[in-house]
């Protein structure tokens, strides 16, 4: 465990970057430091590997003051990933990744084998091994940066805005990859970002810092969204924190209805028996085709080329209530389509039903929080 | 066409190809003076440039000294050195080294200082020692610029080393000075041509060194 105890960083000119900050960073989880620029989040991270020396307070790593071991030994026990990857442009990808193992005295062959293994782990094609950094895209370079930090299998990983410089699509891919790698490796990760969405997506714990390096709130992301400590945190979370909080509620318990689902070759009798104003038409395999008004259908034959688009379906269990609600909002008829892993319709659900599920989840959430508090 | 005739006459005269005043001997002397001066200048300019570039300190003082050194006339310095310490190799080396140190020093400093700070930060953060950061992260990336500083220093030395002949030493300057004195313009033009050839050879050597020593990742092809 990393324990930051009343740490202060005051520069000679009097500016205070971090002000008596205390944090307990749990093992084998992702702790995110987030806040506006000038809040001291990067300074805090850089004090953990002593790239910046604090002017007050102590940082303990597994109970021992980090000042008590040689700075290079400390740094070699922590992976370090920075914004633009910071790759060595004169070295090939495989040699970039092998840097720390080579520094630790591994043989060339063993270090390269390890590097190849890591390329696979972070989702890099082996054919890139002999390329140079300038031949890779920004996203690929950042993967190399992560692989390089993991090369000597350090227990701690420090990540300083690692995904800020890539476009949103690539960033999402990198975030998902990091969560997957973390599932496999269980590192103690300290992650700095200015992007609250990234913090909420990645963090097991999120520390919100405010200007002047003071801690505004330290909580799991769901708690941050449901009960921000003050106006600053609330503003920083943005106007739609209620909607975002739905990401933490599962959609598995949603009550689906199959009444309004009809196959394209359904007879007139089946259609007349249905009460729903809109019907979801499926193909013979059960995959969605589109919505049709009930009145059009009673005419008998279903014209598949005149159906309303069914929008994006969600997968109950895998997707959150936020996704389900989004699907319903985007649907032309106000109903979300639920599918199984194979894309076959398992039912539909109305905005109203989703709204009830949200209210139920909120009530349950509050009860949980009270239990934790009590 | 006079000049070309002179060149042709100079190089086709077999008497110019051997003996203590022959082309190979004078060429070799010139090369020796040049290499020695370059080695001494590099021994001064490279370490100071690398160190100041790495730490980022002393840049202003460096620029001041370098500009002052550039303002010194080589020939005047030679005469002064001879007056102070007499004839010999040392008074010739002084103006050549003074001439060559500023381009080496200033470009090396600039080359190291302008290396992207991100990889340096990454290297430091992964626990690399400072000397390793300099030689394994900064220098490989700064190498093309460092070589260009050495190259312009080398070219300046090669063309200026002709002044060695003024103080009774050898080298290709012998032909130019003796030729002027004897009004033998064939010799003057021949000597000047040889200096130009050596300068071109120097360029070729540095081009090859760049190809061999600079990583394809830095050359970007």
Image (cartoon, rainbow, N blue to C red):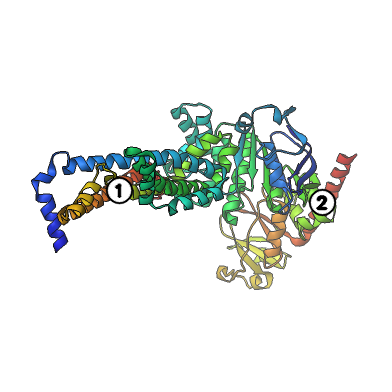
Relative placement, left or right, of A4 versus B117 is right
Gap in angstroms between the C-alphas marked 1 and 2: 84 Å
Circle 1 residue: B163
Q: Tell me residue B94's x, y (percent).
A: 39, 42
Q: Quadrant of the N terminus of chain A?
A: top right
Binning the other alpha carbons within 10 Å of mark 1 as few (below 14), some (14 to 19) or many (20 upward) gives many
Q: Quick one: SS at disc 2?
A: helix
Residue at the image point whose x is 13% and y is 50% from the top = B11
Q: In the image, is residue A229 above or below residue A49?
A: below
Circle 2 residue: A226
Residue at the image point whose x is 76% and y is 59% from the top = A240
Q: Residue furthest front?
A: B83
Report which quarter residue A30 is drawn in.
top right
Q: Nearer the viewer, mark 1 or mark 2?
A: 1
Report which quarter residue A243 is drawn in.
bottom right
Q: Is residue B150 visible?
A: no
Q: Tell me residue B192's x, y (percent).
A: 23, 53
Relative placement, left or right, of A205 versus B21 is right
User: Which one is nearer the viewer's eye here, A188 or B213?
Assistant: B213
Q: How many marks are shown on the rendered structure?
A: 2
């Amino acid at each position: 465990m990393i324990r930051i105890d009343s740490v202060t960083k005051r520069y000679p000119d009097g500016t205070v970057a971090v002000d008596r900050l205390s944090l307990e960073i749990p093992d084998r989880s992702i702790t995110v430091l987030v806040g506006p620029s000038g809040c001291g989040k990067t300074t805090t991270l850089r004090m953990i590997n002593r790239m910046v020396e604090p002017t007050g307070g102590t940082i303990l790593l597994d109970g021992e003051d980090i000042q008590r071991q040689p700075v290079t030994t400390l740094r070699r026990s922590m992976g370090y990933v920075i914004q633009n990857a910071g790759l060595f442009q004169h070295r090939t990808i495989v040699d970039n990744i092998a840097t720390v193992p080579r520094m630790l005295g591994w043989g060339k062959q063993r270090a390269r084998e390890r590097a190849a293994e890591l390329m696979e782990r972070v989702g890099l094609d082996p054919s890139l091994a002999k390329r140079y950094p300038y031949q890779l895209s920004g996203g690929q370079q950042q993967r190399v940066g992560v692989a390089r930090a993991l090369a000597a299998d350090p227990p701690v990983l420090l990540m300083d805005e690692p995904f800020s410089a890539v476009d949103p699509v690539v960033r999402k891919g990198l975030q998902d990859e990091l969560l997957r790698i973390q599932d496999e490796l269980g590192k103690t990760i300290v992650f700095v970002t200015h992007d609250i969405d990234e913090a909420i997506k990645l963090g097991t714990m999120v520390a919100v810092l405010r200007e002047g390096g003071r801690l505004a709130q330290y909580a799991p992301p769901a708690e941050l969204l449901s009960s921000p400590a003050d106006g600053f945190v609330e503003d920083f979370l943005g106007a739609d924190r209620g909607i975002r909080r739905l990401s933490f509620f599962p959609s598995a318990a949603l009550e689906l209805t199959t009444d309004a689902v009809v196959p394209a070759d359904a007879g007139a009798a089946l259609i007349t028996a249905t009460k729903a104003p809109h019907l979801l038409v499926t193909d013979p395999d059960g995959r969605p085709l589109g919505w049709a008004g009930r009145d059009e259908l009673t005419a008998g034959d279903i014209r598949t080329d005149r159906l309303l688009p069914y929008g994006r379906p969600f997968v109950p269990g895998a997707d959150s209530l936020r996704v389900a609600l989004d699907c319903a909002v985007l649907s032309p008829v106000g109903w979300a389509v639920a599918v199984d892993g194979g894309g076959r319709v398992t039912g539909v659900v109305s905005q109203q039903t989703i709204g009830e599920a949200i209210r139920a989840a909120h009530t349950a959430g509050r009860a949980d929080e009270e239990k934790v508090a009590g | 066409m006079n000049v070309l005739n002179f060149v042709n006459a100079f190089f086709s005269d077999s008497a110019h190809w051997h003996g203590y005043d022959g082309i190979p001997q004078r060429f070799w002397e010139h090369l020796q003076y040049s290499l020695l001066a370059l080695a001494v200048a590099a021994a001064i300019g490279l370490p100071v440039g690398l160190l100041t570039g790495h730490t980022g300190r002393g840049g202003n003082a460096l620029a001041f000294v370098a500009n002052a050194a550039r303002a010194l006339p080589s020939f005047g310095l030679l005469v002064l050195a001879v007056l102070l310490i007499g004839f010999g190799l040392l008074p010739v080396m002084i103006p050549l080294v003074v001439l060559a140190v500023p381009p080496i020093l200033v470009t090396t400093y600039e080359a190291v200082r302008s290396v992207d700070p991100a990889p340096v930060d990454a290297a430091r953060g992964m626990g690399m020692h400072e000397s390793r950061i300099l030689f394994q992260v900064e220098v490989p990336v700064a190498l093309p610029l460092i070589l260009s500083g050495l190259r312009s220093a080398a070219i300046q030395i090669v063309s200026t080393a002709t002044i060695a002949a003024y103080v009774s030493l050898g080298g290709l300057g012998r032909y130019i000075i003796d030729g002027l004195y004897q009004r033998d313009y064939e010799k003057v033009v021949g000597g000047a041509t040889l200096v130009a050839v050596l300068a071109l050879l120097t360029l070729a050597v540095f081009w090859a060194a760049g190809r061999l020593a600079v990583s394809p990742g830095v050359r970007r092809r």
